[in-house]
Amino acid sequence: MKRVWIINQFASLPSGSSGTRHYSFAKYLRESDWEASIISGSLEHNTGIQRLKNSQDIKLEVIDKINFLWIKLNSHKLTSLKNRALNMVYFSLKLIFLNPLRFFEKPDLIIGSSPNPFAAISSYFLSKKYNVPFIYEVRDLWPKTLIEMKVIKAKGFIDKILDFIDTFLAKRASKIIVLMPGGIEFYKGKGIAGNKVVWISNGVDYKEQILKKDKNQEIFILTYMGSLGPANSIETILYAMNYVNKIIQNKALINLKLYGSGSKEKKLKELSNKLKLENVSFEKPVSKNKVHEILSSSDALILAMNDLPRIYKYGISFNKIFDYLLSARPILFASCAKFDIIKSSKAGLISYAGDHIKLGKNITKMINMPENEKKKYGLNGRKYLLENFLYQDLSQ
């Protein structure tokens, strides 16, 4: 059996609330005689939960026959971007001086994932140390994403550093994995051969059961599941609900539930209170194991992206989209993506990113839509998902 080390500071478990991409790949890679060991940080990404005790600096945990090596990071508030950045550097430095051979055997391959670009470059140096091929997995298009989101300035110092790291790794990797289909064109624009770049999307583990909403429940349940951070335009959803409340006769007949946490949670709650959205509730994050139950018992699901067409022209890879499609529920999406899975699968109603009025109109349209039409949207999405985005297929 061959061995691969997957290095991702933000890897998660089904018992957590984040995406389980690498856990799922590790599980199915065993079927092809690859043993995957995942090296990750001790803090759960979306909640900040510390996985290690104060006395622990590193811990090997075997979960479902998968090796997880947790590296201790400093606990901090989710709103602290400074401490999050420091932990990214801290994790990367620890990787350089880490001796994973204390815990598992020498790898045949190392994959460095780029939610933390500094950890990706540390992963490359580990591959050189053990003289094995390196695969660069690109989760976000750094630094372009940060520039478009106005987190950093174009041609500034941070932009130049991140662009240097990205180009350095792209040129030296044996292969590049991108999570968005247009990522291949992005790297071709950097002079990287197209056949060196492979699109391997996020996906889901197959679950046969489809739960249905209680027919006796008259309230229309609209659900959002995901981060309450800058990557998602929850403000658009709240303003859309404000529009809906003004035009429907009885706003008590619809309830929006927002499941998640993140750096903008406090501000979003303040906005909801300001708009007097009494039919909007903020719920705690739930484990990946419980996501399907909540989504599939909703009437419809909703998400909104930021109006950033220059970055989303390469596509999207939001984990929540695949969970949404699996639930067989109709989807309301505010999007500016060029490669739009919801549109391709005919899984729901689409409005343009940032247009809360159009999104609000689509919500009211969905509320009044006959059950057979809503069911058709949901089944379209699930069918498309099962044909294209199962982890047991993607792992091949």
Image (cartoon, rainbow, N blue to C red):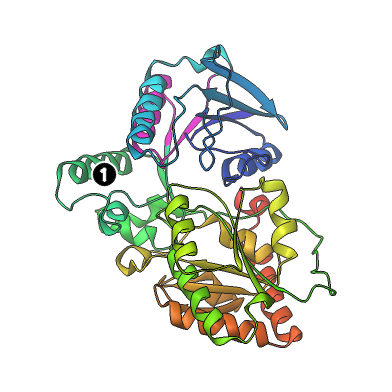
The mark tally for this picture is: 1
Is 70 located above or below residue 319 in the figure? above
Q: Is residue 70 magenta?
A: no
Left or right: residue 310 versus residue 15 is: left
Residue at (28% x, 59% y) in the render: 148
The spot of residue 72 in percent (x, y) is: 49, 21
The secondary element bearing badge 1 is classed as helix
For disc 1, the marked residue is 167
Quarter of the figure that contains the N terminus:
top right
Residue sticking out furthest to the right: 216
Residue 328 versus residue 334: which sits nearer the camera? 334
Q: Considering depth in this image, is 392 or 68 the residue closer to the camera? A: 68
The image shows residue 280 at horizontal and vertical percentages of: 58, 65
| Residue 84 shows in the view | yes
Tell me if residue 88 comes above or below residue 230 in the rendering.
above
Q: Is residue 36 left or right of residue 317?
A: right
Residue 374 in the image: state x and y as whole percent: 70, 81
At x 66% / y 47%, what residue is drawn?
288
| Magenta-colored stretch includes residue 113 | yes
Tell which of 50 and 309 is nearer to you: 50
Packing grade of label 1 (10 A; few <14, some 14-19, many >=20) is: some
Residue 269 is situated, as x and y percent measured from the top left of the image, at 49, 57
**Residue drawn at x 54%, y 15% as measured from the top left:** 54
Asked where in the image residue 363 lies, by quadrant, the reply is bottom right
Residue type (three-letter) at the residue carrying disc 1: Thr
Q: Is residue 396 visible?
A: no
What's drawn in magenta, residue-wise?
106-134
Q: Which quadrant holds residue 259?
A: bottom right
- Between residue 376 and residue 355, name the one nearer to us: 355
Q: Is residue 99 above or below residue 387?
A: above
Res 82 quadrant in image: top left
